[in-house]
Amino acid sequence: MRSSSESTARSRLALTVAPLQYWWSRERMLAFYAEVADSAADTVVLGEVVCARRRELKLADWLALARELRAAGKEVLLATPTLVMGEADVRLVRELAQQGEFALEAGDASALGVLVQAGDVAFALGPHLNIYSQEALREHAVLGATRWCAPAELALAAVSRINPAQAPVPGRDGPLATEVWAFGRLPLAFSARCFTARHHGLNKDNCDFRCRDDADGMTVRSGDGRDFLCLNGTQVQSAGVHALLETPAALRAAGIDRLRLAPTSSGFARVVELFDALVSDTLPPAGARAALRELELPGELIDGYARARAGMEVLTEEA
C-alpha cells in the first residue's frame, strides 16, 4: 500500500510522450523532439513501433536523441517493435536489450523473452501486451517490469481493478505504476500486411513508402460518409482522437500514475500544455476539452473506451 507521504510527494501525475506512430521525415522528427525537450512532458518513449521498413533513424540516432532528451531532464525509454516478425526484428530487440543505457518498453511477448534472457534489464510493459487481469499483470511484473501501460481499450473501472490504487501489484522497484492512453488516435490492430500499401495497389515489400504522405495516417470513411478508421501502414487506428479528461483525483482513485500522449502533426505542444495544466489541477476537464477542440487535430475528440462504451463515442460533456 502506498503511504500518505508517497501520495503527497506524487501530487502531479506524470506525462509520457508515446512513440511516434507515423512516418515523418528525419528533419521533422528532430524538430518535433526538440519541441518535446522544452515541454512539460516527464517521459519520452522513442523508437519505430509500427513498421520495420521505416528507417529514418537508426539505433545510433535514437540513442543520440535519447541522450539529448535526458540532458533536457526527460526520462527516456526505448520501445521495441510491436510486431517482431523476422530475424532482423529479433536482432534489433537484442541490440536494444544490450545497450544498457536506457530502460526499455516491451512491445510484444517475444520482446519480453529477449529482455528476460538478457538479465538485469529494466523495462516497462507496453500498451500492446495482452494484459487484461490482475493475474496476468502479476505474471508479467515478476519478470522485472517497473510500470504498466494499460491496453487502450480498457475502461478506467477495469484498470482500477487490475492494479488498484490501494493495493498495487508489486514491480521491480516497488509498486507497479499504471499508465493509460490519454490522448491520440487509438491503436486498434497491427498486421503483417501493410494497409496503406494495399490501398494504393502495392505490396508491402514494394510499398513506395506511401505512408510518408500521411502525417496523421489515412482516414477511412464509412458508407454514410462518417470518419470510421485510420490506416497507418501495418496499423489500424481510430479515426477519432481519444482524449481522457478527468480530474487528478479521479485518475488517482483509479490507480493511475501517468498519462500517455501520442504525437500528432500539429498542435502537440499545446496538447502537452493543456494536459500539464489538467494534471496539475489548474485547469478543469471542461476547460481542457474546449481548448483541445480549438486545435487542428486529425479527428474529433472521443472517449468511449474509458467509459466502457463504444470507443468512437464523442467526448462526454460532463465535468
Image (tube, rainbow, N blue to C red):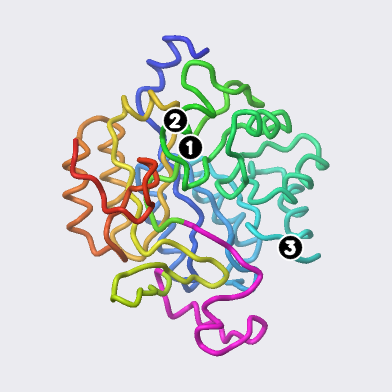
> Which residue is located at x 35 percent, y 28 percent?
12
The residue beneath circle 1 is 179
- At label 3, counting other C-alpha atoms closer than 10 Å, the crowd grade (few under 14, some 14-19, many 20 or more) is some
Q: Quadrant of residue 201 in the image?
A: bottom right
Above-or-below relation of 29 to 167:
below
- Looking at the image, which residue sits at the far right? 117
Viewer-nearest residue: 198 or 298: 198
- At label 2, counting other C-alpha atoms closer than 10 Å, the crowd grade (few under 14, some 14-19, many 20 or more) is many
Above-or-below relation of 318 to 135:
below
Disc 3 from disc 1: Cα separation: 26 Å
Disc 2 from disc 3: Cα separation: 31 Å
Instruction: State which region is magenta.
Output: 187-216
* Residue 161 at x, y percent in the picture: 50, 27
Above-or-below relation of 297 to 97:
below
As for residue 213 lying within the magenta part, the answer is yes
Verify CB contact (< 8 Å) between mark 2 and mark 1. yes
The residue beneath circle 3 is 89
Whichever of callouts 2 and 3 sits on the residue coming sooner in the sequence is 3
- Looking at the image, which residue sits at the far top? 4
Above-or-below relation of 90 to 44:
below
* Residue 286 at x, y percent in the picture: 17, 41
SS for callout 1: strand
Type of amino acid under label 3: Asp
The residue beneath circle 2 is 257
